[in-house]
Image: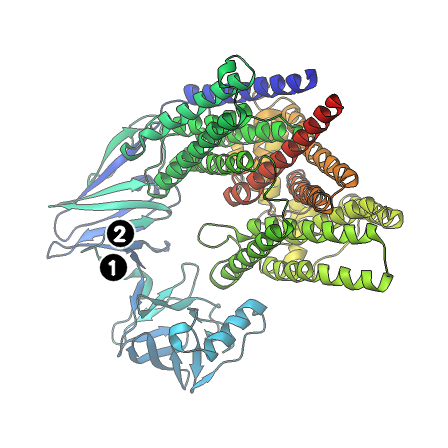
Amino acid sequence: MGRRWDLFHATAAALALLCLLQLAALLRAPESWMPSAITVSLQRGEAVTLGRDELAAPHAAAGHMTLGRDAGGRWFVGAGESAPPVTLMTGDSSSRSGSIALAGGQQFTIGTSRVVIASEHDGVAQFSANGASWRFDGATLYRNDTALAPCPDTPLAARAVAMWNRAVPRLLTVARPMTIGGNLHCGNRLGVPYVAPASASVTRRDGGLVIAQSSESTAPLMMGSAFPQPLARLTHHLDGVDALIVGRTRFAIEQSGDALVLKPSRYVTLYSDPQVTLPGQVAWTWRQRGLWTIPASGAWMPALALLALAASAAIWAFQRGHWPFVRHTARRERIAAGVSLLVAICGVTALLLQRAGAPPGAGASFLLASAALWSCLLLPGRLSLAWASGLLLLATGLLAQLELGLGAFDSSWLRHYQKTSALLSIGLGTGEFVALRMRAGSVLARQAVVELALVLLACGALAALAMQVLFGDETGVFDLQPVEFAKLALTALTAHCLAVGLGWHHSGGDTSQRWRRWLRMAAPVLLFLALLAVALVQVDDFSPLILLLVWGASMGFVFSLASRTRWASAALVSAALAVCGAIVLLRWGGTLDPSGWSFYGDRFLVWLEPLRHPHTGQQLLMGAQAIAQGSWFGADNLLGLASLGDGAGSGLAIPAVQDDFAPSFFLNRHGLAGALLLWCLQAAFLAGLFATAARAFAASRAARDFRQAWLARFRCFALCGGAAFVLGHFLLSWGTNLAVFPIMGQPMSFLSAGGSHLLFFICPLLAFGAISAQSFEEIESCRSMSNTKS
């Protein structure tokens, strides 16, 4: 009993400290100002060039766009000289400046080639170029009615999509752009000598085809024949346009006589003083950044969060016996499940408000995240080491993201903290609700139910991966990362197969029959693993494959221990030691020449000699500089306590500092001493998961019913698989930030602003660990009661 209370009190004290540090950062944050409206006043025939400083758009270029009025008084916009295009939003559709819809009779010239559009109807264009007749339907490019062969560097997924587009009717085709440039006619590429590939593109949009020039192109795409004009410099009238996107900043538009009012949102520059020098035609209306503001549509959310926190505290008091008349277990758990569901609803509301462009202030997100964390700590059930350390790791990540958001001179950085708070509330609230409703594990005890759930989980993960391959890119699809969901499905499916296979292994029998059983059980896992690897190979990074290798080796080692196969355990340990030795030789004394390895060779060259690659090695060098500034006790020499709420310093300039290089910012702010504490928490989390897995395996050995034995083995391997993936994330992220490995893009679990990783993997893993630990507590309680009666 004493150990349990010591763990609870220590966790509560540490969690209270982390929450107080977040509150102190919010209260100490200096005042910041931003423009709420930018008014541009022009007479007819006048124009003005606006850019980063005039628009408070940190990602815009200097002189990014030209805004003006023609002789008739109509407003128009165009991209500035050598500037990226401006996006025009009209309802749900969008278009870019410097682009135009294809129509019959148009002529374009790029390099030495002239393109003459013969006709365009229902998204199909007929044109002539380079002495040939061409046809493009938004998916496939035909030369003289023959589809072109794939380009030599086309990946397998793109080849499959091209074959699909040629085989199905046009209504079922997947839209793929036609690119202009390069010396070779292939795939969907119209080759032009001495012009870089993808200098211009033609895409399907709103039932038609639109041509646009790439902002990186050095060869201008000229439109017209008699007096050709650069397509990138074309202007567009603002009649009917609702908003503009300049850089990453969105501006809502309101026309009022001789003035045009631009209302910025997202990615707005923050100023410490409401004063700035502007052209005479431009005026700003200032507003102060509100950290505690709440949208009117979500005003009830903080009240519900506080109510959930108060109800959790009351339930905690009930279960400690302060009010004996409400000790009824079933009633208490129903109330606790309602509290968890309330927290999840608040998280969904906060996420919807953020997606709608009116997120709650950082203070409201702090209340929501605190309610989620404390509700999970105070709700019924014995506190396990994995659950306690997981909550503290989540609170640490929230603190780091809040410091990063408050220390940036850009309003967008706080969105990482706000999004993480919302997703954390959804994940923890839903996970705790499921854990409370499945206390006894009676639903999981039915193997047929679990197998059906695993089939549905695997099908959903495969469908999500297919959508990413077909419609997304390495950043995901629809703002989600299906790979994280696939990790969860792969872990559960493998755990089931290993649990059943281990039972067969212990049961003995004919060796040939055993091999057939193993092949039958391993087939779905191998199929799913192969499909997952195909999807991961599409990413220009080898970190997912390394992560799978760490996971596979860990699961092999765990199974060899469970099956008492000592030679397999020794072989895996020897292989791991050999890999560590190879890394040491490569990093500090190797003579490897990876210059012929293309993309991966560049990564290794940057890793081995970053000073000789100042452009590609910028991320590694800036991360090392930030870590050096942090030293032992942080950049402020007080473990970051003196800089709470202040500027983020040089760490903010590190590319992907909120994701892959979040540990570098943490080391810069809190020093190596703070990192040592973080390492201890991470080690405690992994130790807690492995300890629960060991208890599950012991329970499977003592079980007399084969269903209970299978369930305990399933829990053991699922927890080990989840811990192996988390261990892989820890190793890759720390190794990347400390230059032990080449740069590999994997977020730090709990610390980085990885929304999909948090929602689809970390929170389910925590909930599953809580369900498993609670089930073993109930089993031990039943055994102790039976022993007492006997």
Percent x, y of residue 428: 51, 35
Res. 2 in view: yes
Q: Position of residue 512 (x, y in %)?
A: 84, 64
Q: Is residue 362 shown left or right of residue 643? A: left
- In the rendered image, the quadrant that contains the N terminus is top right
Where's the C terminus, which quadrant? top right
Asked which quadrant contains residue 119, the reply is: bottom left
Outermost residue toward the right in this view: 567
The residue at the far top in this view is 322
Q: Nearer the viewer, residue 435 or 682?
A: 435
Q: Which residue is mark 1?
A: 235
Amino acid type of the residue tagged 1 in the rendering:
Thr
Is 267 left or right of 75, judged from the image as shown?
right
Residue denoted by label 2:
66
Q: CA distance from mark 1 to mark 2?
A: 9 Å
Any part of residue 589 in sight: no
Circle 2 packing at 10 Å, graded few (<14), some (14-19), many (20+), is: some
Q: Position of residue 220 (x, y in %)?
A: 38, 66
Residue 789, placed above or below residue 691: above
Q: Give the image quarter of residue 515.
A: bottom right
Labels 1 and 2: the sequence-earlier one: 2
| Depth check, front residue: 563 or 729 | 563
Does the CB distance between marks 1 and 2 fall below 8 Å? yes
Q: Give 697 or 459, whichever is nearer the viewer.
A: 697
Q: Residue at x 34, y 56 (%)?
A: 85
Q: Secondary structure at mark 1?
A: loop
Along the viewing direction, whichever of 397 and 613 lies nearer the viewer:
397
Judged left or right of residue 627, residue 550 is: right
Name the amino acid, label 2. Thr
Q: Is residue 206 above or below residue 679?
A: below
Image location (x, y in percent) of residue 270:
36, 32
Position of residue 227 in the picture relative to residue 566 (left or right):
left
